[in-house]
Image (tube, rainbow, N blue to C red):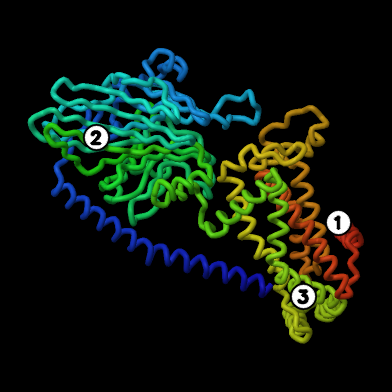
Amino acid sequence: MNDNKNMFIAIGLSLLVLVGWQFLILAPQEEARRAALEVEQAELEKSQPKATLNHEGRVPSLEAKQPDSSVIIPGETLPTAQEILEKGSRVKIATNRLEGSINLVGGRLDDLLLRGYREEISDKSPLIRLFHPVGSNNAYYAETGLVASAGGPKLPDSKTVWEVEGNDVLSVENPVTLKWDNGEGLVFKRTYEVDENYLFTLKDKVENSLTSDITVYPYGFVSRRGRPSTSGIWILHEGLLGVFGEEGLVEVDYDDLEETPKIEQVKADTGWLGVTDKYWAATLIPPVGSSFKGRFAFNSGVVPAYQADFLSDPVTIAAGASTEIETRLFAGAKETVLVDAYEKEQNIKLFELLIDWGWFYFLTKPLFYALHWLFAVFGNFGVAILAVTIAIKIVFFWFANKSYISMSRMKLLQPKMKEIQERHKEDRQAQQQAIMKLYREEKINPLAGCWPVLIQIPVFFSLYKVLFVTIEMRHAPFFGWIQDLAAPDPTTIFNLFGLIPVDMPEWIPLIGIWPLLMGLTMFVQMKLNPAPPDPTQQMIFNWMPVIFTVMLASFPAGLVIYWAWNNFLSVIQQYVIMSRQGVDVDIIGNMLDTFRKEKKSKQIEKTD
């Protein structure tokens, strides 16, 4: 009882320290940082002329009007993406990894599908659509361009109809150039380039034939109409994000943006910003060599709009000269190796954080690369998980051995402990003191058995993170019925694992074969351990495998396979060590004793 009391006191004090730190230290620091940002913004607005942006309002468009000035009426049925694509004037995109089109109205990239990724496992399932055309209910697109200060020259905007100059299909080998003449001495050319993966390069060239210099401000935004469905789990960020110089990574959830519709960022010389889903993202990398101001914005119209945008420092184009401004856009799958390569080769600061590695970054990312390397060896991520588990067991072999030896010695002391319990049956405090004295005399640490579990928790969470956030695990098969290691085991005991052709209601949990194997191995392992002296603790330990089976049934199958395989290896290791220590390891006998005790306990309850 005292141990339990001390544990609760320790938990309470820990929570008190955390809460106190949050309110007394972190909160004042955050308030001071915000005040400094407000001062910096005020000084910036005084020193820099405010740009008058296009007819949709400040870059980007998050006013009441929807793209192309079309107002959505409640109850109105909007055209589908396919209907919009069939009517508009467009330039086709065709690479080995992408297909879609560029809208000649506004020069927007608003139609993009990812080859190689489908909505479901079936080959007949539709391709993943990243960008949706402007005018559809789920419009999602990227736009770059130039705006001028008040009274500046006429510039292309969202209604500008561009003309194709030369090649009319964008591919890896063939860029596409669009042209527009403002009729007042300025010619604009926008060139789209794409690499063999998901990186677009957009070059805005301005030819100034006027007799005076002009000044323009480069901008870009990723805009999304309609709130997307998200995983809704705290370990994964889905929403808007960016890196802004020394400020580092900034993440803004959809809920946060709805509460604060405009979130300005610090002015930065390097960085990127955009919108991310679990597996896909669209991010802009502003022009190199120029400072930019980032912002996240929200408009609560009939269809809510979310947007990440930037406005760069002004660029002056001399009379009779021309200038080219380059902006990059990543739009595709968040493949780890590719994202890391872009960070290094394209010099994109902290671009690896586009993938949410979480607090255990120092474990999750190395663990992913270990799995990735083993996948290259075995050709199966499930087998890679089994191999990584063996490697982890080897790394922590010494700790586990010490723990199992300690538990073996505790098991040998079970008769003496039972004697103490009988002798001090009416005095729990004296019983605990006598048991602790026995531990000291035998030089046994009763907490040693916790080491394997404590060591396993960070690894378990890191593997869960890797399975959950990395696209490489999506639709990755194992063997048999496991065709997606990132999804739960699809079988369930309630229809005899598919033998009865009945679809179970969604409210019934899927308790499949692998969760049951995990629960069974956990139960066997716990039966090898010495029984806790306290009857309440014994009951909790007996029910833990059942609780974990139900809990982990909804977790990714790859994680459950890891846990079951880890338990199996632990049982073998513990069995060998305990046998060498002279312990009579009778797994079946221990299991039968458990059932007999439960049966006897129920009989006593009925008698009472």
Q: Is residue 535 left or right of residue 75?
A: right
Q: Quadrant of the C terminus?
A: bottom right
Q: How far is mark 3 from mark 2, CA to CA?
A: 68 Å
Estimate the x, y position of residue 243 in percent, counting from the top left.
37, 49
Q: Nearer the viewer, mark 1 or mark 2?
A: 2
Q: Residues within 10 Å of mark 1 (few under 14, many from 20)?
A: few
Work out whether residue 266 or residue 12 is closer to the camera in this orientation and state it: 266
Q: Residues within 10 Å of mark 2 (few under 14, many from 20)?
A: some
Which residue is under mark 2? Answer: 58
Estimate the x, y position of residue 213 in percent, counting from the top left.
11, 35
Q: How far is mark 3 from mark 1, CA to CA?
A: 33 Å
Work out whether residue 130 or residue 542 is closer to the camera in this orientation and state it: 130
Work out whether residue 325 or residue 157 is closer to the camera in this orientation and state it: 325
Asked if 457 appears above or below 442 in the picture, the reply is: above
Which residue is under mark 3? Answer: 406
Estimate the x, y position of residue 570 in percent, counting from the top left.
77, 61
Quadrant of the rendered structure where residue 312 is?
top left
Q: Is residue 548 left or right of residue 87?
A: right
Which residue is under mark 1? Answer: 602
Which one is earlier in the sequence, the residue at label 3 or at label 1?
3
User: SS of the residue at dot 1?
Assistant: helix
Work out whether residue 29 or residue 92 is closer to the camera in this orientation and state it: 92
